[in-house]
Amino acid sequence: MNNLEKLREFMKKEKIDYYIIPSSDSHQSEYVAEYFKGREFISGFTGSAGVLLVGLKEAFLWTDGRYFIQAERELDGSGILLMKMRTPGYPTLEEWIKENIKSEKTLGFDGRLFSVNQYKVFLDIAKENNFSISMEYDLLKDIWITRPELPKGKIFIHDEVYSGKYASEKLQQVRKYMKEKGAKNYIISSLDDIAWLCNIRGNDVKFNPVALSYVLINESHANLYINNDKVDNYTREKLKNEGFEIYEYDEIEEHVKLIKGTTMLDLNKVNAKIYSCLSGDIKVINEMNITTKLKAIKNEVEIANTEKSQVRDGIAMVKFIKWLNDTLGKEKVTEISASKKLTEFRSKGENYKGDSFGTIAGYKDHAAMMHYSATEVTDYELKEEGLFLVDSGGQYLDGTTDITRTFILGNVTEEEKRDFTLVLKGHIALSTAKFLKGTTGMNLDILARRPLWNYGIDYKCGTGHGVGYFLNVHEGPQGIRPEGNLTVLEPGMIITNEPGVYKEGKHGIRIENTLLVVEDINSKEFGEFYGFKTISYCPIDLNGVIVEMLTNEEKDWLNNYHKTVFEKLNPYLNDEEKEFLKIQTREI
């Protein structure tokens, strides 16, 4: 509340009536460096997604269903009202602004933290309601005395033995696309797109191997804007040979002012401040970055490497499950200590570079918070009873993993076993889907939900997200959710399958594997059909399954999956671990 009141003091000083603080950085990233966590600093809400609107007398925080329970707890007593996104009775941020901010008021925000499209929405409302917009002020710079510095870690080359393609080849693909579209310039600001394009990786954002940077491409030059201290001589020379010139990170705005000719960019990714630097007579081509589409379809080298990293990850998971099984009831195990142990097992794997996100380890009712993160205050000790959900992943030079298992630690209720089995049925339904070329994830989402809907149960989040290749664990454009994603699923795309049940005050259950889209049936009469290949290898806890609820086809899938898991992992385990895995993957 002290930080909130300080912000209001500076708002009055700058004559700003309402101020917005999003969760994003200057590149519209989902996960951001500590420097950009201003929303958390002011509100106390630690979730990864949310927008804070502060008025001189009132304040509101919008977040999605993953964080409703967490936000209610963290905002308690702050004076900030929780606004539940996509929930009846709660207006959107834009609807609230339209209804409440009227003439002669001023709405402020840092223009670097909002995309052009977001800014345009605010601008349209401002014109209609006759209020002013100011996007020049980062009001936190004077309030946040202990604000972390912008990260300065070194970048490194992601070698072609892993990437499967030279950066110069990727640059050539982009220039070819620019020519087809009639674009003379291309501004790219999304960090994972730049990392993929340049074959570089960094450590500016925790868990995401990216570096704060921009790229500006024209017919003859490709400029990478990045803090020069991050680039050693070898990397600089390699990038130069691949066709990239290095400039300082903050030179981008001045260079954009000099652009002439048709310019291509993604208005959902480029920030409003950079866009404002373009000359008013520049023709803009707005569409999703071609790099986003290109990197979504993994090449043969990336797919082969990903398979290797998934096996390595599965080995770590089995060792963790065995450790949990052997230790529980003999030594104290908590949500935090279990998470650390899993990271320890992963860290022993070849090419390991860190976790791909903060492990979600939720015991009993904590698991009902989809993105729960244990603290020293909330850390539960695990007992030989109930359900323990662990959602985790690793970053490897040759892949990114994401997997969730819910473990039966002892006695569970019939309701918990039923819910576990329903989640498994939804998971199997999606895993076994065959679908016509042109299908989107939105078309398939119902498959995972149907077993749950039959019992009047739903989960307030998507069913699956794209996964990067030694990049962001959440990667577009593909996704599986009930609304809003029209991206066609294509062979080579990697996506998760993670239905769940979340009951506040009771339990949370999720079963997640990673899937590869593959060609399946080619029919002369009806066209091409695709399917999924499961590439996560880890046993599903059979102690949670009510076998009688499964069809013969579902039992066959589960038995075949466990047979594959055993065959993939068995060669890398010692005798004791092999015997343990044999029991975990037994036929039902």
Image (cartoon, rainbow, N blue to C red):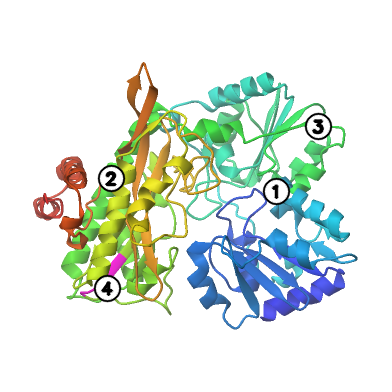
Given the current orientation, which residue lies at the most extreme top position?
A: 524
Which residues are the magenta region?
384-388
| Residues packed near mark 3 inside 10 Å, few (<14), some (14 to 19) or many (20 plus) | some
Q: Tag 3's secondary structure?
A: loop
Q: Quadrant of residue 501?
A: bottom left
Q: Residue 333 has which mark?
A: 4
Q: Is residue 243 magenta?
A: no
Residue type beneath disc 4 = Val
Residue 289 appears in the picture as rendered: yes
Residue type beneath disc 2 = Arg
| Residues packed near mark 4 inside 10 Å, few (<14), some (14 to 19) or many (20 plus) | some
The residue to which callout 1 is attached is: 115
Residue in view at x 77 percent, y 43 percent = 275
x and y percent of residue 331 in the render? 21, 75
The residue to which callout 2 is attached is: 312
Q: CA distance from mark 3 to mark 2?
A: 47 Å
**Secondary structure mostly taken by the magenta-highlighted segment of the chain:** loop
